[in-house]
Image (cartoon, grey):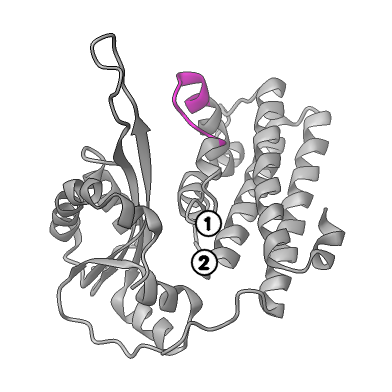
Amino acid sequence: MKPFTLYHLCRDAFSFVQQPLVDIIVKAAKPDMIFLLGASLNRRRSESIFNETAPASGHISGCCFLILIPDLSNKELYEWQDKIENNCKPLMPVATIVLQSTTFQAWLKTSDRFAVAVWQSAVPVYDSGNLSPVVPLDLPNTFADKDNKKQYTDGLTKAKEFLAGSELYRVRKQHAMAAFMLHQSAEQALRILLKVGTGYYANTHSIDRLIRYAGLVSCQLPDIFPQETDQEKRLFDLLQKAYIDTRYKEDYKISNDDLLCLTEKVRRIHKIVYEFGKSTFNTAVLSSIQ
């Protein structure tokens, strides 16, 4: 097991929240296994005229888990994810990937990159003892193969074309359509970053969920939409709802200024995805999508 560095450096911080979160998840889903994929640490330093040497302190502010459950019980995966995340929210914001145990076992048998990486490196914070998967010995060396390169270039090209479409609709004052295309551009970019970076394909249109998942690959992504003020929350909500509301709700409205602000944020996502690809693949592969 080779968990991420933060887990080793802040074991006390993890021990404080790990078991309560596990208890909530076990009660909600009765899983076979729970893996810790990643976490965020907030640091704080306080000083005063009475104490000028206070050390910095840190606390875990969010976690990402893979949860394997034996039976979906006629629920969709996203319903399980929403249920678990809502139950955990009073204690801590978490992002969850829920899979049926048989799916994960099948992925392991075929040396799926995401499944093998989880099995070899993730922290198993809960194990019911009910799984005995056949585990490949080595992580497949497919990170920068031809299929991944093609997926990456195709995905980022689509993201840029959606962005160009959004710009055209904005100039034509079709603001709702511009917002829809902007959503599609962000979705494509985030999904390809997640797929190439981890091997996992997220079947979701939620920008919020894709940012939390893709945050496993890039720590910069959560800072693009901080949502710390009402204005930041309102702006993100406009993008999040653009996929459905722009097509099916007549009351969806977005201003030109809001579109311009969101466009710059989506461009930042593109830049992160491009720089990731630049460091992963031969730069010649990216010449056509700069």
Instruction: Please identify the quarter of the rendering in which residue 130 is found.
Output: bottom left
In the rendered image, the vertical position of residue 220 relative to residue 30, given as above or below: above
Question: According to the image, label 1 marks what residue?
Answer: 217
Q: Is residue 85 left or right of residue 116?
A: left
- Residue at 72% x, 23% y is 256
Label 1 secondary element: loop
- The residue shown at (17%, 46%) is 16
Number of numbered markers: 2
Q: Left or right: 37 with respect to 156? A: left
| Mark 2 neighbour class, 10 Å CA radius: few under 14, some 14 to 19, many 20 or more | some
Q: Looking at the rendering, which quadrant does residue 62 occupy? A: top left
Left or right: 66, with 261 as reference point: left
At a point 68% along the width and 69% down the height, the residue shown is 151
Tell me the residue at 72%/36% (across/down): 178
- At label 2, the amino acid type is Thr
Residue 225 lies in magenta, yes or no? Answer: yes
The answer to whether one can see residue 172 in this image is: no
Q: Is residue 68 above or below residue 105?
A: above
Can residue 25 be seen from the camera position used here? Answer: yes
Q: Secondary structure at mark 2?
A: helix
Q: CA distance from mark 1 to mark 2?
A: 7 Å
Task: Give the magenta-colored segment's residue range.
Answer: 224-234
Asked if labels 2 and 1 touch by Cβ distance under 8 angstroms, the answer is yes
Residue under numbered circle 2: 198
Picture coordinates of residue 30, whole percent (x, y): 16, 65
Inspect the image, locate mark 1, and give the three-letter code of the amino acid beneath it.
Val
185 vs 117: above or below: above
